[in-house]
Every structure is written in C-alpha cells, then in structure tokens.
Amino acid sequence: MASKDRIQRLKEETRINILDASLQIVKEEGWQALSMRKIADAIEYTAPIIYEYFANKDAILLELTRKGYLILSNDLQEAKSKHRLPAKQLEAMWLAYWNFAFANKELYQAMFGVTTSCSCELVNTLSEAERPWDLFSEVIGELMGIEDMDSDVICTKYYTFWSVVHGLVSINILSRGFSDEVNRQVLKDAIGGLITSITK
C-alpha cells in the first residue's frame, strides 16, 4: 500500500513539475516558444514521458488555465470578504481582478487568449471558469436588489464591467497603456462610474 502511495505521489510531483516548467518557459520566452520537447528538456525527461501525463500542448494550456481561474477566484473571494457593503465589495473585486492579471500575466493570457490562442470551447467546459462570474453576479445582484442570478440585467451589467476592465488589461498587456498611476485612476474611475450607474 505504501508503495502505491509513493508511486502516486511521484506521478503527481512529475505532473506538477511539467506544469511549473511550462509556465517558466512561457514567462521567459512567451507562449509561442512552448513545446513538449522544450518542457522535457527543462525537467530532464524524454518527450514521450510528458505525453504520458498530457496528450498535447493544448492539454497543458488547459490545465494552466484551470489553475489561473482557481487563483483568480480565491483572490476575488478574499477581496470580497474584506468589505461588508456590495458597492465596496464590487470595487475591491475588480481591483483584485486587475492585480491578478498583472501578477499572473501568462496565465491571464491563456485564460482569455490575449497574445496566445485560446481553446475557448474547452475553457468554457471548466467549472473553475464559472466561479468568477458566480462571485461577481452575486454581488451585482445584491447591489441591485435582484435575487435571480440568471437575470439578463445582472448578465448585462457583469459584461459591461468585464468589457471595460478586460479591455484595459489587454491594452496594457500589449504595452499600449500609460503609467501604472494613470491606469489605476482610469480603472477606478470606470469602476466607480459603473457602480454609480447601477445604484441610481
């Protein structure tokens, strides 16, 4: 029994090493540089070993995307828990979203296809990808006094927020933004204006 546990633990460690090596390659060289052979070289395994864990590069991309959504959801939950009023929660959560995007730029690129290909059909099947929407829609609903989380109104408001924040993130990932100070002010102005518009 102990031997089976050890083998399972080693397999999980190898799987984690593959994902860590993949992310490190992307951080150093960009998504276009990622290949199964390069990953194998980084962890000093042969390429066929990598295929025992992941069918192809897209499978690795999907797993890193899942990881990104888990981190983002935790960050959003933490930001929400620091405030009692929905308006303050919403502002803190979108600021946390912004911070996540730049603290985990490579994961963000994979999650939303910014400067890399996105297997959006596969990403949409991830239960983890639903969690940010659930967190935001709950707060938006509370702020607007709407209990139906499937309400078209909540959906529209969420996508309005997301379009503005994601757009600003994308502009800056492509290095077309301004200074961090200006970006944060634009972000706060936009979030504040949208919050005000739905509380009138």
Image (cartoon, grey):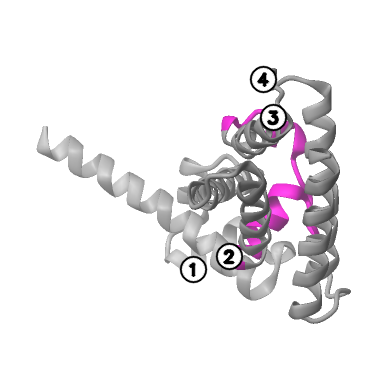
Distance between the alpha carbons at the discs numbered 4 and 2: 50 Å
| Left or right of 31 in this view: 197 | right
Instruction: Residue type at mark 3: give it.
Output: Gly
Tell me the magenta residue range: 103-127
Secondary structure under badge 3? helix
Q: How many numbered callouts?
A: 4
Instruction: Residue type at mark 2: give it.
Output: Lys
Q: Which residue is mark 3?
A: 141
Distance between the alpha carbons at the discs numbered 1 and 3: 47 Å
The residue at 47%/41% (across/down) is 52
Q: Which residue is mark 1?
A: 42
Provide residue 192's location: percent of width, then percent of height.
78, 55
Provide residue 100's location: percent of width, then percent of height.
61, 60
Residue 104 position by quadrant: bottom right
Q: Are discs 1 and 4 less than 8 Å apart at CB?
A: no
| Left or right of 14 in this view: 6 | left
Distance between the alpha carbons at the discs numbered 1 and 4: 50 Å
